[in-house]
Image: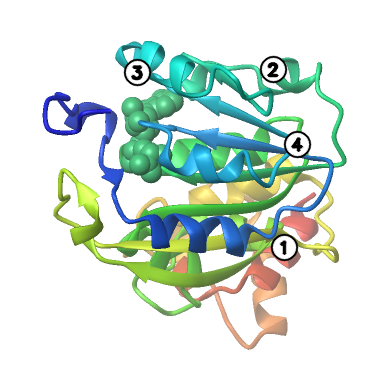
């Protein structure tokens, strides 16, 4: 594709990678095994897709920008390891989309459109499909949030529930200079591998709501953010950690949130 004449859309988060080494590294670190289905969100001009099809039995790539349809379909016309869906990934029924494929494991590998990083990750968690390994490029600051420990300013509700599902690792940093057009942020490639021994949560929807409500006003104490909840029960759990209701959500670990939510369930 002629990158010089393509009118990149900022509103679609279009920053394409021009460095093949980075692409190789991403695919390498995804460690795609045999009989796998790889979901890619936002193939763009297909640079990452091209490498993924060499390793995956099937790549299912979602691209919102119809202007890329002719280019992508022609580029991969002789390849039976890839299918494109030209639609908004967020609007798709993933379970239905993948039901025709035979596979052992699902991987998600993508250079994400940054403006919808959180909705994409949330969708991957909440849809009834089981993803083994997610390797994605995100804005560096967002990667820092995924990896934040309690007490750090980047620690938020997303950190808590991502860590509930996944072991999260920073793989490497990527400079803004390897993209066209050059974005005004740096990037990070992270991996999210499904935990084998997830903490036991009695009621997941209660857990998610509790975590979200706890962080609703970041500067407020738990007592103020959780007025609607049974504060006596919460305080009892906090005391076992030598804490009380004046604590802020950012100081609580995943384990503490799980204990509180189980006490309320
Ligand atoms: N994978 C390519 C690369 O690495 O060079 C392009 C990555 S670019 C950061 C993000 C891509 O996601 C763009 O091609 C954009 O059009 C696409 N995109 C944006 N929003 C989308 C959505 N809601 N559903 C599917 N694709 C989307």
* Residue under pointer 4: 57
The image quadrant of residue 82 is top right
Q: Residue at x 25, y 62 (%)?
A: 186
Does label 4 or label 2 sit earlier along the sequence?
Answer: 4
* Residue under pointer 2: 97
Q: Spatial distance from mark 4 to mark 1, Cα to Cα?
A: 38 Å
- The residue carrying pointer 2 sits among few (fewer than 14), some (14 to 19) or many (20 or more) residues within 10 Å by Cα, namely few
Give the number of the mark in front: 4 or 2.
4
Q: Residue at x 70, y 42 (%)?
A: 56
Does label 4 or label 1 sit earlier along the sequence?
Answer: 4
Above or below: residue 149 compared with residue 83: below
Contact between labelled residues 3 and 1, with CB atoms less than 8 Å apart:
no
> In the image as oriented, which residue stretches furthest toward the bottom?
242
Does label 1 or label 3 sit earlier along the sequence?
Answer: 3
Assess mark 2: CB under 8 A from ligand 1?
no
Residue 246 location, x and y as percent? 46, 74
Assess mark 3: CB under 8 A from ligand 1?
yes
Residue 132 location, x and y as percent? 75, 50
Q: Spatial distance from mark 3 to mark 4, Cα to Cα?
A: 23 Å
Above or below: residue 170 compared with residue 156: below
The image quadrant of residue 16 is top left
Q: Spatial distance from mark 4 to mark 2, Cα to Cα?
A: 16 Å
Assess mark 4: CB under 8 A from ligand 1?
no
Q: Spatial distance from mark 2 to mark 1, Cα to Cα?
A: 33 Å
* Residue under pointer 1: 258
Left or right, 185 with reference to 65: left
Left or right, 112 with reference to 127: left
**Picture disc at residue 68:** 3
Ligand 1 placement by image quarter: top left
Above or below: residue 106 compared with residue 189: above
Q: Residue at x 17, y 25 (%)?
A: 6
């Amino acid at each position: 594709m002629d990158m010089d004449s393509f009118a990149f859309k900022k509103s679609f988060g279009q920053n394409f990678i021009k460095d093949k080494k980075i692409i190789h590294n991403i695919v390498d670190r995804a460690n795609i095994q045999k009989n796998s289905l790889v979901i890619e969100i936002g193939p763009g001009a297909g640079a990452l897709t091209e490498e993924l099809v060499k390793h995956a039995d099937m790549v299912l790539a979602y691209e919102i920008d119809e202007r890329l349809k002719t280019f992508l379909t022609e580029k991969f016309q002789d390849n039976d390891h890839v299918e494109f869906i030209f639609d908004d990934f967020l609007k798709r029924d993933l379970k239905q989309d993948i039901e025709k494929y035979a596979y052992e494991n699902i991987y998600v590998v993508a250079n994400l459109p940054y403006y919808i990083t959180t909705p994409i990750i949330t969708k991957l968690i909440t849809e009834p499909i089981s993803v083994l390994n997610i390797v994605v490029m995100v804005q560096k600051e967002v990667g820092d949030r995924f990896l934040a420990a309690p007490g750090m300013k980047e620690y938020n509700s997303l950190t808590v529930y991502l860590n509930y599902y996944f072991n999260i690792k920073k793989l490497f940093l990527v400079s803004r200079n390897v993209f066209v057009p050059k974005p005004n942020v740096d990037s990070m490639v992270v991996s999210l591998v499904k935990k084998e021994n997830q903490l036991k949560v009695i009621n997941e929807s209660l857990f998610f709501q509790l975590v979200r409500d706890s962080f609703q006003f970041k500067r407020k104490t738990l007592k103020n953010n959780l007025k609607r909840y049974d504060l006596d029960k919460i305080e009892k759990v906090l005391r076992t950690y030598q804490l009380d209701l004046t604590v802020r959500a950012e100081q609580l670990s995943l384990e503490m949130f799980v204990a509180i939510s189980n006490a309320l369930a």
